[in-house]
Amino acid sequence: MRSSEIDASTIPNERAVEPAEWLPLDLFSSPSKLKEGLAKVGYLADDRIASTVFLAARLGKPILVEGPAGVGKTELAKATARLIGRKLIRLQCYEGLDESKALYEWNYKKQLLRIEVAKLDRTNNGEKDGGDTVAPSSWHELEDDIFSENFLLERPLMAAIRALEPVVLLIDEIDRVELETEALLLEVLSDYQISVPELGTINAKTIPLVFLTSNNSRELSEALKRRCLYLHIDYPDHEREEQIIAVNVPGISERLSKQVAKVVGLLRSMDLKKAPSVSETIDWARTLVLLSIESVNAEIAKDSLHVLLKYRSDIDKVAKRLQSDDSFVA
Amino acid sequence: MLEVLADFVEELRAASIPISPTQVVDAARALSCLPLEDRSAVKYGLGAVLVSSEDHWEVFDTVFEVYFSAGRDISSLPGEEKQEESSSRSTRIRSALAQLRGTPPTSFSAYQEMTQKEIDDLLAMAVATGDGPLMTALVNIVVTRYAAIEKGRPVGGRYYFYRTLRSLDMDRIKLALSYASMNDDMDEHDPLTKLLREREVESRLDLLKDEIAKEIRRRLVADRGPKAVARSIRRPLPEEVDFMNASSTEMTALRRALYPLTRKLAAKLAAKRRHRHSGSLDFRSTIRHSLSDGGVPVDLKFRHPHPAKPELFVIADVSGSVASFARFTLQLLYALSAQFSRVRSFVFVDGIDEITEVLEKADDVAEAIVMVNKEADVVFMDGHSDYGNALSMFWERWGGEMNARTSVLILGDARSNYHPPRVHILKAVRARTKHVYWFNPEPCSYWDAGDSVLSSYAPFCDGVYECRNLRQLTKAIEAIGA
């Protein structure tokens, strides 16, 4: 609508600071260093995760994290924020998310109030000056006023872009928004800028480190995928799972955590509707510790299957496998 | 380095992984900041840039192994094996051999005169203890001895792989492995322990097989160069595997891809149903919400629409001519019935039977297939598919249960063995139902050739789709969902 030159001049258009410049160099000197760092803040990454995050930091590109539910996709973003000691801004996606919830919104109520006040002012002034000569120009003033940053409500993406201090931006469960809404993100993700028709283009002061997570409930658009680095996090292997259990379940013996990891690996290799996730594994390990169980056998596993598996048919199936040998003996 | 990258990308594209020029530029930038001496970092880094779907990862992994073979410095490609590496290998083997025999080997090159048995035992030991270097060293020897790789022969290495495996005493290794994993103090008769051990042995053996395949590939690459090798081991992506001639491993991969696919489809269709019409204006709610804006109705509120859920009748041909497709069809039916609320499934050869309940009862696909084969009464005369008869039986028994909300989906090749097609029945079905769709697993060019009578049915279908692979299937289901 109105010329954006005036407003653009109020927003300094400098080159944004890249992640490679603001991230602590010692932590991001190599993927293995990063892996160590993440382990220190309680996130056990594998080589693939570490390499991808490292590269994202160096190239200044967002990471698209996919994988089954409960393998620590969101936790990766949180852990990274913890590691570098920056604020995490989170945008939780849902069906029906629109720009007023993701980017920005005009504070309509405040604008209304402002107009009311202007009306009052004008009638007061009008009485004093004895004329309404000020009216036409005051409308321009008013418009400038109510479409200024004072009336802008920042939503997560805008907040991440405008933050003075660099941040970590997490866009969670991106697959929940409709395909059309995805397009909202493209400008932000590739150029790190947001166009507000009334204000002009707002550029990022510092480029945030961006994580997008997806549960893969639908195919994401090519345009979005192309702008991101792709990371698929799968269920961890035995050793990593063992370590994860050891870190998250205090007081567990090494032997038990080894067994838990093995049993869960076995369950995942079966053809189940919903394989046990890492968080469910941890729940199960906690349960076993609380019951002060030293070693898992078929009987115990059968009795506590409901912690790991969430479908009746899955539980029945595994229970069947676990006792089939007994019936042969009997 | 850039040249290798260009060749690498070219090969990936040839394997039909889509890679845009921007991605190539990013890959080059990635290489400039990744530590090249760290092989896995390079692999995962390049993967993050070049691969944008987990389905493509396996192909990427194989091509990467070919182009950036392990055991070599990536920056000095292609290079010869380093001297010290091979000598460290031989020391490792000698010490292991000494442990096995009880006495240190007499000569420096004693390991070259190892007996077959000793090799098997050492392999079992390496696999059981997870001793990587020892295993690599042994695999090196095994491949030299048994694979008998002929130079310059344009093969993909499967043949050498099986020749090597045949020469090893796998049972002996397996036995040694299960003994080795028994040292835990777990209850021996516990079924869980048994299951765990079986899996442990399997996964360790897979590790060994993997190592052998890798070693053979490495030698092929050294012999003929990465380009030629990559070409001879090229395999189609999971979504492009032809249903009609998929191998059993490909079938497993397909099955794994199927479940998320149906989930995605269900989500998409549900979203479409919900968003097609918004309901009528909810006046009361609009006024209520306008209070917060000073009485100005800024946000219009609408009632939630209540679209009717469509009913789906799936009729699948399970005869011999589409045998492998039929297996897949059953899996598809199974996956669909778990996702859509109202799917009724039928299978036919020359008779027809409903299997909706069978699919509901079954715990998994394998069980469902067994039950369908056992229980479904699909053979009417001779067990050769007869579309006409199957259709008329369908019409007689279930025709009355279809209505204007029903969609009918027919899966089959329309090869009716020259029986009369009885087109009028499909016409009647079409008249009573909302839609009729036909998915054909044969390539377009085969339609109407021989005993295929698709074109006589086609006028009464809302759409006839070629469904030879997952990609086409997805497209077809999306098209009918619209």
Image (cartoon, grey):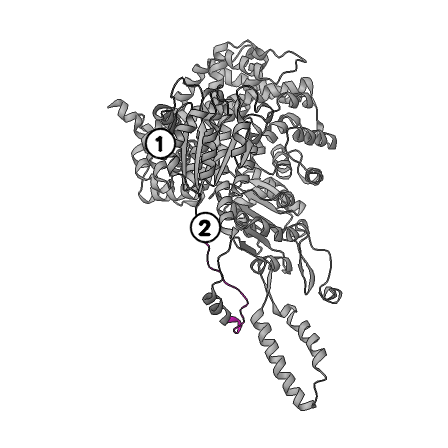
Looking at the rendered image, the disc whose residue lies closer to the viewer, 1 or 2, is 2
Q: Which mark is residue B307?
A: 2
Question: How far apart are the two marked residues, 1 and 2, measured between alpha carbons?
Answer: 29 Å
Task: Report the amino acid beneath label 2.
Answer: Pro
Q: Which numbered disc flags the more N-terminal residue, 1 or 2?
A: 2
Q: Is residue A59 left or right of residue B133?
A: right
Residue closest to the eye, A33 or A283: A283
Q: Which residues are magenta?
A: B292-305
Instruction: Using residue B276 as the reference point, say whether residue A324 is left or right of it.
Output: left
Q: Chain of mark 1?
A: B
Q: Residue A182 in the image: state x and y as whole percent.
A: 59, 50
Which corner quadrant holds the C terminus of chain B? top right
- Of residue B371 and residue B106, the one placed in the foreground of this image is B371
- So how many labels did they put on this image? 2
Instruction: Identify the mark at residue B142; answer none if there is no mark.
Output: none
Mark 2 element type: loop
The kind of secondary structure element at disc 1 is helix
Tags 1 and 2 touching, CB below 8 Å: no
* Residue B108 appears in the figure: no
Is residue B304 shown in magenta? Answer: yes
Q: Is residue B116 above or below residue B127?
A: above
Judged left or right of residue A57, residue A176 is left
Residue A264 on image: x %, y %: 41, 35
Q: Is residue A102 visible in the rendered structure shown here? A: yes
* Percent position of residue B21, x then y: 71, 38
Q: Quadrant of residue B224?
A: top right
> Which residue was labeled with disc 1?
B358
Magenta stretch prevailing secondary structure: loop
Q: Amino acid at mark 1?
A: Val
